[in-house]
Image (tube, rainbow, N blue to C red):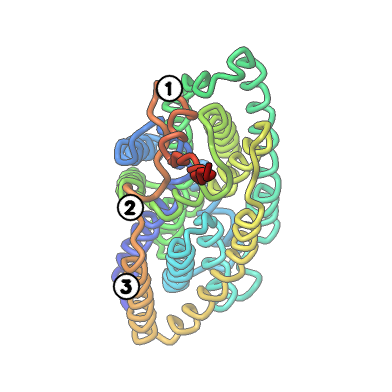
Amino acid sequence: MDVPLIVVLVILLALFFDFTNGFHDTANAMATPIATGAMRPKVAVALAAVLNLIGAFLSTEVAKTISGGIIREGDGGVQITPVLIFAGLVGAIVWNMVTWLFGLPSSSSHALFGGLIGAAIVGAGIQSVDFLVVLDKVILPAVIAPFTAGVVAWSATKLAYWVTRRYDGRPDGRGGFRYGQIFSSSLVALAHGTNDAQKTMGVITLTLISAGLQPTGSGPEIWVVVACALAIAAGTYSGGWRIIRTLGRGLTEVKPAQGFAAETSTAATILASSHLGFALSTTQVASGSVIGSGLGRRGSSVRWGTAGRIAVGWLLTLPSAAIVGALAGILADVGPVGVAIDLIVGAAVVVYIFWRASRNRVSSENAVKPVPLQGKSEVAASAKAVKIKKVKPLKRPRQRKESA
């Protein structure tokens, strides 16, 4: 296949992955404010899309980790081809779509890394992957970041309830945190743009370097930054309601103070990692924060069954995407026919998943349960939900008149 044509194909596929990353990870920023009623669902995803777009321009450190770290290329290393990058993207997209169908907040980042690693090993050998960088920049952050975010969220939730303890006994006494959630969730969306959008920039840059169209070691071009920013923003605006339902209500019942604490913890962790060039999973960080906030509120409970399923999804993401990427790489290595088969099979899988999802549609109307409106107490709201039937008094049997 002509190299420029495969490069164009890879860029288009990378932008589609960026789109799936957007709707897959919208829940990271907006699940909790939607669940608590801080923002209307459609307003929330629109705001997240705009802030994802802005955040994509603020940093390129993570993009450099992808383009010049995980997969060795250039002088002194194995030159990965655009065909293998294409196969890796197929693996990442397929896994993203499968987990979205089941509402699992898995890591789009690890799906991408797994797909690229699997394709690279099959096509260029195991030496093409720098496993030290994978361990340092991917595996360790994946283990440490969710735990750290959870501890911070637990502490922040405890602090929030301690500071506002005078409101104990007033069901809506902490409703003011809903206003704080507008700021904190916006910060998460901005942070998401600084981390996740960079990964697709790194993939496209890696493709241009491997095709000899860009110098080794250089960062992403401005047109790459713009294209990736727009793609992830469009994906974010499309919603990702299935995963919003899981994070917003599936893990724990989120109250405004909890949501504020979780979002602030998530944003702080992501921004720090983006600054250090760690390509962590924003989904794992957000999930850890939600669990931590659930443990931090007295009387709250965490649904550990759901948390366990999410954890299994995390563990399976990297190897599963690697297997799909490797299979796609074997086909793509055959030549143009193999690439065409990859495209057809991948497109068929995506279409089938969308069809399956349409049979059990989740939208902004049914993603989360309705919450009490501001100004109305939860006690009053619950009274409407439970109808108490009036019990009619039992009629006493008439006494028979004794005969004289």
Residue at figure coordinates x 44%, y 59% from the top left: 209
Tag of residue 363: 2
Mark 2 / mark 1, whichever is N-terminal: 1
Identify the secondary structure beneath mark 3. Answer: helix
Residue at figure coordinates x 37%, y 35% from the top left: 51
**Which amino acid, by three-letter code, is at mark 1?**
Tyr
Mark 1 / mark 3, whichever is N-terminal: 1
Q: For the view shown, which residue lies furthest in the top direction? A: 166
**Which residue, given by chain and number where applicable, does mark 3 sit on?**
351
Residue neighbourhood size for the residue with mark 1, other residues' Cα within 10 Å, grouped as few (<14), some (14–19), many (≥20): some
Identify the secondary structure beneath mark 1. Answer: helix
**Which amino acid, by three-letter code, is at mark 2?**
Ser
* Between 31 and 340, the one nearer to me in the picture: 31
Residue at figure coordinates x 45%, y 42% from the top left: 31
> Would you say residue 81 is visible in this rendering?
no
Tag of residue 179: 1
Residue at figure coordinates x 46%, y 25% from the top left: 377
* Between 83 and 91, the one nearer to me in the picture: 91
* Cα separation between marks 3 and 2: 18 Å
Q: Given contact means CB atoms under 8 Å apart, are the residues at marks 1 and 3 in contact?
A: no
| Nearer mark to the viewer, of 1 and 3 | 1
